[in-house]
Image: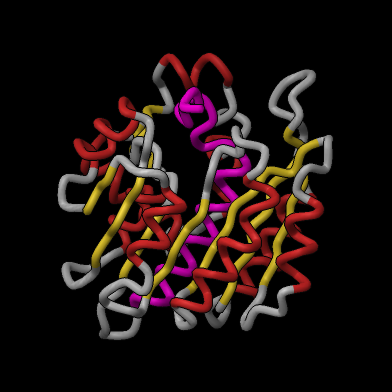
Amino acid sequence: MLSYQHGFHAGNLADVQKHALMAVTLDYMTRKDKPLSYIETHAGRGLYDLSGVQAEKTGEAREGILKVADWFGADHPYTKARERIAEEFGETIYPGSPALAQALFRDMDTIHLAELHPGENEKLQDALPFAHVVKEDGFAFAQSICPPTPRRGVLLIDPPYEIKSDYATIPTFISKLHRKWNVGVIALWYPILTTGAHVQMTRALEAANFPGFLKHEVRFPPAREGHGMIGSGMIFVNAPYGLTDEVTRLTGLFRSL
């Protein structure tokens, strides 16, 4: 299934949670003068126009980053990445996770991205010409490239969950990756739906007893009447030092909505 396009949802409250935590993670890891690898299994197109037709149709960004931008001060890495993207591409352009990584990375760092959707893949290559971009199944790609060179790095698993079996297979997928790449920071994003589809997956991951395990879930109003997503979650394996501070801060901010 290749119908999902993130342009309709870019900059929504789920993105705010995900991108704030990823920005803090990448900022912390780039403080050490050693090269990093960044890998993403479902990268999307990289850059999104919040004034475009898709974003305007849903209005999710208006209730997301455009509403809560003041949660993040000028020194927050999420703000810094967004400002760097705006300077290069324009004020209405919002960075997806790959562009966020590129904005925070150094010349020594490497980016590997998988995106199977043909149209999204083409736009991704245009947006991030210096990244290694493949049109492959993201899960298979991650297994093939891990452990990456350099070994220090971050992997983001961010599928659209169009394939419902993803909830059942992801715990085993992460276990296999961690055995191959035990020093890697593995991050997983998932939606919190009214159906509770994520619950068995998160329980299985909690039971796996991974090192540096961190789970963060937030709730927010549905984007529109009848919309099934009422929150989002992030799970980290080998979570970097200090990420719990941002988790605590975000928890309080989302509760204020």
The residue closer to the viewer here, 67 or 231, is: 231
Q: Give how far across and how far down residue 74 sits, in percent.
A: 43, 58
Can residue 26 be found in the magenta stretch?
yes
Instruction: Determine which quarter of the picture holds residue 184.
Output: bottom left
Compared across the picture, whether 119 is left or right of 204 comes to left
Q: In this view, does 80 lie above or below 236?
A: above
Q: Is the magenta stretch mostly helix, strand or loop?
A: helix
Residue 118: tell me if it is visible. yes
Q: Give how far across and how far down residue 181 sits, in percent.
A: 44, 77
Question: Residue at the spot x=61%, y=39% of the render?
Answer: 161
Start-end of magenta stretch: 1-30
Count of numbered circles in the view: 0
Q: Is residue 238 above or below residue 83?
A: below
The residue closer to the viewer here, 108 or 82, is: 108
Q: How is the image coloured?
A: secondary structure
Question: Residue at the spot x=31%, y=69% of the render?
Answer: 37
Compared across the picture, whether 32 is left or right of 155 comes to left
Q: Give how far across and how far down residue 216 sits, in percent.
A: 70, 62
* Image quarter of the C terminus: top right
Question: Residue at the spot x=22%, y=53% of the render?
Answer: 132
